[in-house]
Image: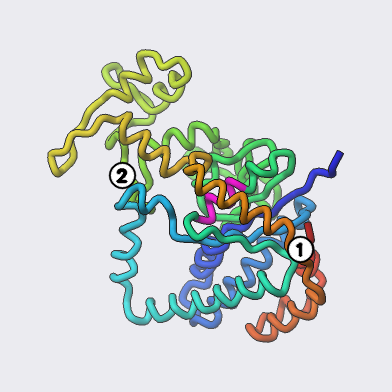
């Protein structure tokens, strides 16, 4: 019987650009340095905490979702165009640094770096987990979309809040204490992955420009109206509550009529990371298979020191062995 591995699956662009904001008002060079520190140290932390075996950096491609649903992430360009010239210039410099970081990881370390031309990093992470069902997985990302993948062998680490999310709940990675919900004063409620997916398919995702299947739907229903919770609980039997909820109709601002179940099914295709088209999943599987058979890279420690010198990562270069552990982690 093969030993169970622990894969560290990094949502690379998400983490790099979220880390950018931790630097606040500092100049661009300091924020780039901060982003790299957070990236390296987030991986180092989970590698040691969960006895990692191999790190996989997952990159973005052009999403197949844009062909399936034209509005998908169309709001991102509008937001980018509204940014100041200085902000856009800073973004360009950040992308240059990110691309250099990715090239270094791909060519000078024994981590896997994978990209699918027609898929997102989320898709690759979901497929990697499906392809390694007997192993453990730590997703490194700030994105709550991954809550749907949580399982006994899948947890998530948020490097900007320093929290670990599992089926048990939310814990501080630093202290191990439960994260307290500021509204209730109680430990933050654990995520039900199935319900998290169901609710998101109902509510949509404004950050990705996915419209709600049922605007104004409440979590809990009233005497005359079924809520999301009741519909979810009745989804297996497909009884009154489920049908009462899903067969509701509503009219948008363009006078177009919608049936909840139709928009729900559309959203499920867009949001459910296990519902990728077969051709997308098959290509991801092929790319993952190639990554597994990557040729080992020698002198990883020396390459790390050179990268630190290039980007003035002094604090990390003072303790290279701390990072060489995961950078040298071969499959």
In this picture, residue 182 sits left or right of residue 243: right
Along the line of sight, which residue is nearer the eye, 76 or 68? 68
Q: Which residue is mark 1?
A: 326
Is residue 151 something that shows in the picture?
Answer: yes
First in residue order: circle 1 vs circle 2: 2
Q: Residue furthest left?
A: 255
Q: Which mark is residue 211?
A: 2
Q: Residue at x 15, y 43 (%)?
A: 253
Q: Residue furthest right?
A: 1
Along the line of sight, which residue is nearer the eye, 80 or 26? 80
Q: How would you rate the neighbour count of disc 1 (Cα within 10 Å): few for under 14, some for 14-19, many for 20 or more?
A: many
Placement of the N terminus among the 4 image quadrants: top right
Q: Is residue 103 above or below residue 311?
A: above
In this picture, residue 32 sits left or right of residue 72: right
Indicate the position of residue 195 as horizontal and vertical percent values.
49, 32
Q: Residue at x 64, y 63 (%)?
A: 113
Give the magenta-colored segment's residue range: 120-127
Indicate the position of residue 226 as horizontal and vertical percent values.
33, 22
In this picture, residue 212 sits left or right of residue 150: left
Q: Secondary structure at mark 1?
A: helix
Query: In the rendered structure, does residue 93 fall within the stretch colored magenta?
Result: no
Is residue 162 something that shows in the picture?
Answer: no
């Amino acid at each position: 019987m093969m030993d169970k591995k622990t894969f560290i699956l990094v949502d690379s662009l998400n983490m790099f650009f979220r880390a950018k904001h931790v630097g606040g008002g500092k100049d661009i060079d300091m924020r780039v340095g901060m982003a790299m520190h957070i990236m390296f140290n987030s991986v180092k932390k989970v590698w040691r905490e969960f006895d990692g075996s191999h790190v996989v950096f997952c990159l973005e491609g052009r999403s197949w979702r844009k062909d399936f649903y034209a509005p998908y992430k169309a709001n991102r360009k509008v937001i980018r165009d509204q940014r100041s010239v200085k902000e856009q210039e800073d973004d360009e410099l950040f992308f240059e640094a990110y691309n250099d970081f990715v090239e270094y990881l791909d060519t000078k370390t024994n981590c896997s770096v994978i990209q699918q031309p027609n898929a997102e990093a989320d898709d690759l992470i979901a497929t990697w987990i499906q392809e390694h069902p007997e192993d453990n997985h730590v997703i490194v990302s700030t994105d709550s979309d991954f809550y749907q993948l949580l399982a006994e062998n899948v947890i998530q680490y948020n490097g900007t809040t320093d929290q670990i999310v599992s089926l048990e709940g939310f814990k501080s990675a630093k202290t191990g204490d439960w994260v307290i919900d500021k509204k209730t004063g109680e430990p933050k409620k654990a995520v039900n992955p199935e319900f998290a997916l169901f609710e998101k398919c109902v509510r949509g995702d404004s950050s990705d420009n996915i419209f709600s299947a049922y605007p104004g739907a409440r979590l809990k229903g009233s005497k005359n109206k079924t809520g999301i919770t009741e519909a979810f609980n009745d989804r297996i039997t497909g009884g009154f509550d489920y049908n009462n909820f899903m067969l509701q109709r509503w009219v948008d601002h363009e006078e177009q009529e919608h049936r909840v179940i139709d928009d729900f099914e559309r959203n499920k295709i867009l949001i459910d990371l296990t519902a990728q088209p077969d051709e997308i999943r098959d290509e991801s599987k092929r790319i993952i298979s190639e990554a597994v058979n990557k040729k080992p890279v020698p002198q990883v420690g020396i390459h790390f020191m050179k990268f630190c010198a290039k980007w003035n990562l002094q604090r990390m270069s003072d303790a290279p062995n701390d990072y060489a552990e995961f950078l040298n982690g071969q499959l």
